[in-house]
Amino acid sequence: MFESCADPSLLDGLPWLACYLTTGKHMAFYGSFLTVLALLAITAPFAMLFGFGGAMAARSDIAPLRWLGKTYTAMVRGVPDIVFFLFVPIAMDQGLEWLRHKVKCPDWDAPIRQGSDFVVCTAAKLPLSNAPQWAHEVYGFALAMIAFAIVFGAFAANVLSGAMTAVPVGQIETAAAYGMSKRQTFWRILVPQMWVYALPGLSNLWQILVKATPLLFLLGVEDIVYWARELGGAKTSTFSYPHPDWRLYYFLGLLVFYLSLTQVSDTVFQHLMRRLSHGQATLAGEAQRKATA
Amino acid sequence: MKSFLTLTAAILSLSAATAFAQDTVRLGTEGAYPPYNFINDNGDVDGMERELGDELCLRANLTCEWVTNDWDSIIPNLVSGNYDAIIAGMSITDERKEVIAFTQDYYPPAASAYAALSDDLDLSEAVIAAQTGTLQAGYVAESGAALLEFATPDETIAAVKNGEADAAFTDKDFLVTIVAESDLIFVGDDVLLGDGIAVGVRQSDSELQDKLSAAITSMKEDGSLNALLVKWFGPETATY
């Protein structure tokens, strides 16, 4: 990056460190922090959407929809996350390639499964094998994101349906007495009031999601854990910047990153909780009322 | 549901217009096994196999792209089509041949060696660190010594340095620089394992297998392969 870094073997001390910390490899490491944040930013809303849909389905009056909602939460919550993270991306990848294969290469006569190989025609590959590397990475990242959203959506569904049943029955009865339809009661009375009951569970889920992001590494996405391990490992003079085993320092850095991230989220959730408790018939809401009275 | 269908349709038609002028061959490597393959300080794949792979692609007239993948899932991901070839210091064995196919070997059977902190060690009873799913791990398991497996070769060395294992057992070429630059020493005799190192391809992909084999043969014939091996592994290395 800097001109003085042309020959690192001549440097030592701070200049060496400055050059070392700005190598292309380190830039990839810094970039991977954004990967993690992007995963969180995209997955959280999707997981909420899955969760809300799951909770609504589980409470539905239509039996098949109710079974679907209940099966989804029960199944995903009952299977170890890691199994799901390994299963969903492979199943989706092969499923999509199979579909594309059927559409694009109808006259292909060789079997798709040949021994242990999964062979589809070149035009059905996803992404196409001549796609640039970033397309492959985005695709892998998207599959990982969907797996995360499905798993965390199931937990969110359970939290939300619990919160929906926690809204005081008097509120629902009053809505009915005013002549609101079921739909109106749901959107105008139940949903606005359930958040305060859902928030503790959701904040828990968020923290678990933050801490589950290193699982990206398992899915082959080059995240911060991958780069920390790669950069921290002992380097011989084969590399331009030889150093002993520094994994301890790199993992310490990750520890600080995750701690600050969860700390910031905690503050945000406390703030949200204060706002949502306002005017609610809960202990926290009552305490706020007394404090201002 | 409707948006799901639209999405599916979009994915199905994705790049339908792209012309298949020239197929790209994706080469998978581990990127953690210097000097065979490693990620250099610029973040690119480097090493003997990088040079070899690029040269093979040039000779076979293929466009190649490098990808890295963890060692323990490197065969499953080849088989499921994430990339088309493995160039990762992988020796030919009968066990691997049941799942994937190999081209001609590009490195003769290489010596494996033990590295430890001291030489007063009974290798048949010591705790030996090796990388999971390697020939060396299989060899240690059969030798009767206690086997300690790690996901990366780097971790096997770290285990010896912090006393978790008595010795690490890997390809000698990987250990040479490490032994030269740290307080580790070679102990015991070298062991010759495997039937040589080759490129792994899917069993159904005999076209690529033939192209790469032909390119390796032409490199053997004009001596450029030997020159490459000597450049990366030193003048005493086994050549053709």
Image (cartoon, grey):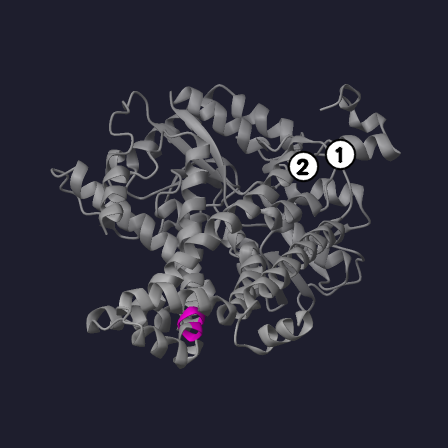
Q: Residue at x 73, y 31 (%)?
A: A240
Picture layout, residue B240 above or below residue A53: above
Can residue A201 be seen here? The reply is yes
Please provide percent x and percent y for residue A232.
Answer: 70, 47
Distance from Cα at disc 1 to Cα at disc 2 = 8 Å
The amino acid marked with disc number 1 is: Tyr
For this rendering, which residue is in front, B209 or A74? A74
Q: Which residue is mark 2?
A: A26
The amino acid marked with disc number 2 is: His
Question: Regarding mark 1 in the picture, which secondary structure is present there?
Answer: helix
Please provide percent x and percent y for residue A16.
Answer: 82, 32
- Is A278 covered by the magenta stretch? no
For this rendering, which residue is in front, B158 or B55? B158
Can residue B199 be seen here? The reply is no
Earlier along the polypeptide chain: callout 1 or callout 2? Answer: 1
**Chain ID for label 2?**
A
Horizontal side of residue A107 vs B69, given as left or right? left
Horizontal side of residue A46 vs A8, given as left or right? left
Q: Residues within 10 Å of mark 1 (few under 14, many from 20)?
A: some
Q: Residue at x 28, y 65 (%)?
A: A183
Which quadrant holds residue A11? Answer: top right
Q: Are marks 1 and 2 in contact (CB under 8 Å)?
A: yes
Please provide percent x and percent y for residue A76.
Answer: 38, 68
Q: Which residue is mark 1?
A: A20
Question: Regarding mark 2 in the picture, which secondary structure is present there?
Answer: helix
Q: Which residues are magenta?
A: A159-163
Secondary structure mostly taken by the magenta-highlighted segment of the chain:
helix
